């Protein structure tokens, strides 16, 4: 079983930054809805905290508030590249130090977070009528995240 103590401060920061950066990647994929989508990130973390128990490592990660350092991200145009790089590094680190199950739990949490943020705000339509649950650009961002994580973006979520 892997714990926070198994990582140095830099490594832990890398793991903590992956999920919110994936959320930001989806958030910046489409204009509009950022307040609802930002609130959804907090809701996903809160729900995951309530469902703790399947992975001690993931429990420790979600116990901390999601936060990003704006200086590390740069502009909105830099987000896709930064998200891909950070997620790749986080998965590589987990593959070295964590169990395969813990690594998969982390990947699934990140993907679930991205999918739920994308679905928090309908895109298009007028006054809430019509529109799409997830826009094409948001789906492309989700697919990119899933590819980086090495998992299928249409895989059913376990809700963590």
Image (tube, rainbow, N blue to C red):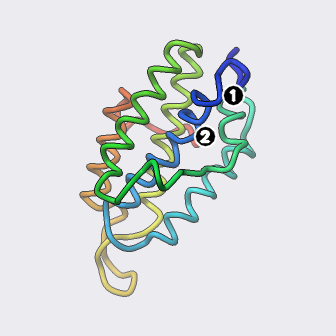
Q: Position of residue 11 (x, y in %)?
A: 57, 27
Q: Secondary structure at mark 1?
A: loop
| Tag shown at residue 90 | none
Relative vertical location of residue 45 with respect to residue 123 in this rendering, above or below: above
Relative vertical location of residue 130 with respect to residue 48 in this rendering, above or below: below
- Label 2, on which residue? 160
Q: Position of residue 50 (x, y in %)?
A: 75, 46
CA distance separating discs 1 and 2: 9 Å
Q: Secondary structure at mark 2?
A: loop
Which residue occupies the foreground of this view, 64 or 40?
A: 64
Badge 2 density bin: few <14, some 14–19, many ≥20, Cα 10 Å: many
Hey, which quadrant is residue 122 in on the image? bottom left
Which residue occupies the foreground of this view, 70 or 31?
A: 70
Assess whether mark 2 and mark 1 are in contact (beta carbons under 8 angstroms): yes
Q: Residue at x 49, y 64 (%)?
A: 37
Q: Residue at x 54, y 51 (%)?
A: 68
Residue 126 at least partly seen: yes
Hey, which quadrant is residue 59 in on the image? top right
Question: Going from the N terminus, do you reach mark 1 or mark 2 first?
Answer: 1
Q: Residue at x 53, y 15 (%)?
A: 100
Relative vertical location of residue 84 with respect to residue 88 in this rendering, above or below: below
Give left or right: position of 13 versus 77: right
Q: Residue at x 53, y 63 (%)?
A: 38
Q: Position of residue 112 (x, y in %)?
A: 49, 44
| Tag shown at residue 54 | 1
Hey, which quadrant is residue 119 in on the image? bottom left
Quarter of the figure that contains the N terminus: top right
């Amino acid at each position: 079983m892997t714990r926070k103590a198994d990582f140095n401060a830099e490594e832990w920061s890398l793991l903590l930054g992956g999920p919110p950066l994936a959320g930001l990647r989806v958030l910046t994929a489409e204009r509009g809805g950022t307040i609802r989508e930002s609130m959804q990130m907090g809701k996903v973390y809160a729900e995951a905290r309530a469902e703790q128990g399947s992975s001690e490592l993931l429990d420790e990660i979600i116990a901390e508030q999601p936060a990003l350092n704006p200086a590390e991200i740069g502009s909105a145009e830099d987000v896709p590249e930064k998200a891909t790089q950070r997620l790749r590094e986080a998965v590589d680190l987990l593959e070295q130090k964590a169990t395969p199950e813990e690594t998969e739990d982390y990947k699934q949490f990140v993907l679930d977070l991205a999918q739920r943020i994308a679905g928090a705000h309908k895109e298009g339509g007028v006054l809430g009528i019509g529109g799409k649950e997830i826009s094409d650009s948001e789906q492309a961002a989700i697919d990119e995240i899933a590819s980086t994580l090495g998992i299928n973006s249409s895989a059913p979520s376990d809700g963590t």
